[in-house]
Image (spheres, helix red, strand yellow):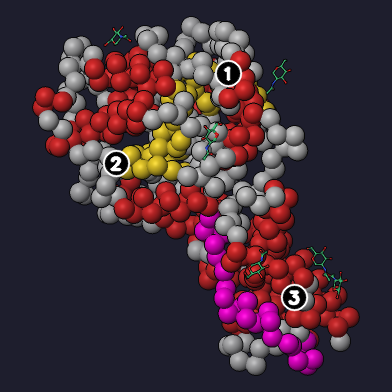
Amino acid sequence: MLPKLLHFYLFLTLAAGFIIGVIVASYTLSQGFVGVDLGIHDTQFTNSTSDDLSSAAWNESLVIEPSIEPATPDLASVAWNESLGFGEVLYVSMPDRTDRQDAMTLAASMSGLKLKLINGVVGESISVKAVPDNNANKWTLRLTELGCWRAHADAWRYLIDSNIETALIIEDDIDWDKNVHRIFQDLSSQMQNNTLRLVPPTEHEQTSAPYGLDWDVLIMGQCYDTAHPKRLDLVHIYDDPNVPSRKDTEEVFLKQMESLGVKGNDVGKKRLISPAYGPICTMGYAITRRGAQRLLLNLSYLNLRGPVDMDMMWNLQEGKIRGYSVTPPPFTAWRTGGQKDSDNKHDPKLPVSVKGNGGGWSSNIKSSARIAMINELAMNNWMDYTKKATPPESEKQTGKENNEKQTGKGNNEKQTGKGSNEKQTGKGNNGKQTGQGNNGERKGNGTKGS
Ligand SMILES: *[C@@H]1O[C@H](CO)[C@@H](O)[C@H](O)[C@H]1NC(C)=O
Ligand SMILES: *[C@@H]1O[C@H](CO)[C@@H](O)[C@H](O)[C@H]1NC(C)=O
Ligand SMILES: *[C@@H]1O[C@H](CO)[C@@H](O)[C@H](O)[C@H]1NC(C)=O
Ligand SMILES: *[C@@H]1O[C@H](CO)[C@@H](O)[C@H](O)[C@H]1NC(C)=O
Ligand SMILES: *[C@@H]1O[C@H](CO)[C@@H](O)[C@H](O)[C@H]1NC(C)=O
Ligand SMILES: *[C@H]1O[C@H](CO)[C@@H](O)[C@H](O)[C@H]1NC(C)=O
């Protein structure tokens, strides 16, 4: 691990390097790579910062999140580790979805996370004898639903078989915020002092359980949710600088938040913890050892009444397992349009993919990690060589004029790809960063140099 300050420093350096890169790249292109004269080298790029960038970039494993671990580490700062302070992060993926596994490995590595693959299960492969009883006969399970249940049951079993206390279970088609460690550090401090707790934390919890252990499931990747209609008093509300704005929050969560007393200006500032009651989808949830035991008992050994998320919800509503929902949820679906978006409901009429990952989208996230990583990894090797060149003294004036012409849109398309830019860097940035600020700087320095 790098010292945290250095991480932050690297992040800033890279960001600055990238912006400068965009300007110079376009200028270089405009010169057709011939007789490159930037008239700005000696000033802009002899800065030691830019030199450090090249060497550091190849040495260190870089992540997209600037580190702001507290100076005095407490239990919540364990959330900065590679499993966010949980025992392990398990992700469920169908073996044939190598595209999604690539995506998860990449996104996790860029977020400083380590994931363990739990293989998804094809429903047909489950023996009739291995299908749980369906005592209530509420629902006839489709084979895909059965496969989905089996994969999650395997994850619960993994925890029980191992010596970890908690596991975060996620699915392979999700997105999270690029400040994911910070979000979980905040969640951890709140969970430790969670006003909804029925009993005070044990000594073991206070020293070793960043999220406490007073729950079976901690729901963090639901696609739908409601609070207990008769227990709207049960809520723990806290400030989180990384919650999505109102317009980035789906209606269902706005409604749930409003029912629990968060509305108006508080939307976009607060996150909520409430007893889990009506969550649907299993894109992200944590379990404790006791939770894994309860789930395996009642969603396998004794019976299975419906799709795994539905039966989990029924158990929550009946009070047979204890859970908390985090709203808005920190894990959300990543979508590209078309068949690739679902392994449960195959629709051959859809195109395979509409937008592709480069143009994909997600909701309920302030700064998408999947979008940030595209920008973070963008580079221009030839421009890096250009940086090293010694510029001739002439043509400095031309340089300026050209730059003004070149800064706009074309740049971005070449460098990062459209989808990603929309949310993260976008137009505002371009106008501000490349248009005036840097040009101005360059003029000042250019003049001095000559
Ligand atoms: C180089 O960059 C550093 C940090 O970005 C800045 O503090 C310093 O003033 C710059 N030096 C020059 C010569 O521009
Ligand atoms: C990167 O690696 C090179 C060669 O091993 C070394 O000289 C340099 O000091 C390293 N830079 C950093 C920032 O660690
Ligand atoms: C992260 O912290 C948790 C809680 O202390 C611990 O159980 C887990 O092993 C740690 N993960 C890693 C990758 O070090
Ligand atoms: C929890 O609350 C106690 C007492 O109010 C306080 O001393 C402690 O610092 C709090 N812990 C966290 C992690 O906020
Ligand atoms: C298991 O689920 C059933 C409903 O199918 C419920 O009636 C029962 O109380 C649950 N048992 C336990 C031990 O949680
Ligand atoms: C230009 O470069 C000089 C060093 O050569 C530095 O002191 C100065 O801050 C730079 N000016 C601007 C506007 O960046």
Q: Which residue is mark 1?
A: 204
285 part of magenta stretch: no
Residue that numbered label 3 is attached to: 45
- Residue at 57% across, 40% down: 81
Give the quarter of the figure containing the C terminus: bottom right
Residue linked to disc 2: 119
The image shows residue 213, relative to residue 177, as above or below, that is above
Is the Cβ of the residue at disc 1 closer than 8 Å to that at disc 3? no
Task: Measure how far apart labels 2 and 1 are at the Cα level.
Answer: 33 Å
Mark in the foreground, 1 or 3: 1
Depicted 434 relative to depicted 208: above or below: below
Asked whether the beta carbons under mark 3 and mark 2 sit within 8 Å of each other, the answer is: no
* Closer-to-camera residue (253/3): 3
Q: Which residues are magenta?
A: 373-396
Q: Residue at x 22, y 43 (%)?
A: 346
Q: Is residue 242 in sight in this rendering?
A: no
Residue 434 versus residue 358 in the image, above or below: below
Q: Nearer the viewer, mark 2 or mark 1?
A: 1
Q: Is residue 380 magenta?
A: yes
Question: Does any atom of ligand 3 lie closer than 8 Å to the CB of label 1?
Answer: no
Name the side, left or right, on which 378 lies relative to 102.
right
Tell me if the residue at label 3 has its CB under 8 Å from ligand 1. Answer: no
Residue extending furthest toward the right: 448
Look at the numbered disc 3 and give the secondary structure of its residue.
helix
Residue 447 in which image quadrant: bottom right
Question: In this orientation, which residue lies closer to the viewer: 85 or 227?
Answer: 85
Quadrant of the displayed image that contains ligand 1: bottom right
Dot 1, crowdedness within 10 Å: few (<14), some or many (≥20)? Answer: few
